[in-house]
Image: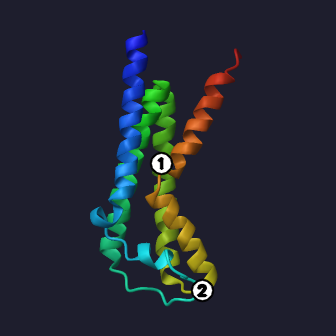
Amino acid sequence: MMGKRIRSSIAVIIALLLLVAIRFFETALFYDPLHDYFHDNFQALPFPEVEWGSLLASYTARYVLNSAISLVILWFLYKSKAYLKAGLWVYLFSFVLLMAVLVVLLQGNSDLAKMALFYTRRFLIHPIFLFILVAGCYYLKTHKTDS
């Protein structure tokens, strides 16, 4: 029994290190002209030139990588097909919604659109849903009812 726990812990640590590596090498791995833009005073700057196809493909690739690694973490933490399936649905639904919002926001140039784009981009390129899913699955696991 202890061997399985150790293997699961090692798998989670490796998956977390993969997420860190994606973040660390993000500028070399992915096309993102908005990276430098959002690290500056973007509210006062004009919107940079963006190659739509490359940007959407890059965000999609990054989202898929982060989501797959996050689902691996979810599996090794809880070993539940139901939680894994729920997580997959959350990631799929969120991807469709966030990409649609991103496309709309990329066409706007107001201060509100820039701020909304900043946060939408963050949800697409960072594994934020992992925190929500881990906490939600933990809650479900510890508060199961016998009904």
Name the residue that disc number 2 marks: 110
Q: Amino acid at mark 2?
A: Ser
Q: Residue at x 49, y 82 (%)?
A: 107
Residue 25's quadrant in the figure?
bottom left
Label 1 packing within 10 angstroms: few (<14), some (14-19), many (20+): many
Which mark's residue is nearer the viewer, 1 or 2? 2
On screen, residue 25 versus residue 137, left or right, reads left
Residue 88's quadrant in the figure?
top left
Figure quadrant of the N terminus: top left
Where is residue 18? Give x, y as percent. 35, 45
Q: Is residue 14 above or below residue 105?
A: above
Where is residue 78? Give x, y as percent. 50, 26
The CA span between labels 1 and 2 is: 28 Å
Label 2 packing within 10 angstroms: few (<14), some (14-19), many (20+): few
Query: Does label 1 or label 2 sit earlier along the sequence?
Result: 1
Residue closer to the observer: 34 or 133:
34
Contact between marks 1 and 2 (CB within 8 A): the answer is no
Q: Amino acid at mark 1?
A: Tyr
Where is residue 133? Give x, y as percent. 56, 40
Q: Residue at x 38, y 86 (%)?
A: 49
Q: Residue at x 34, y 51 (%)?
A: 21
Where is residue 4? Give x, y as percent. 39, 16
Name the residue that disc number 1 marks: 91
Q: Is residue 57 above or below residue 86?
A: below
Q: Is residue 142 above or below residue 93?
A: above
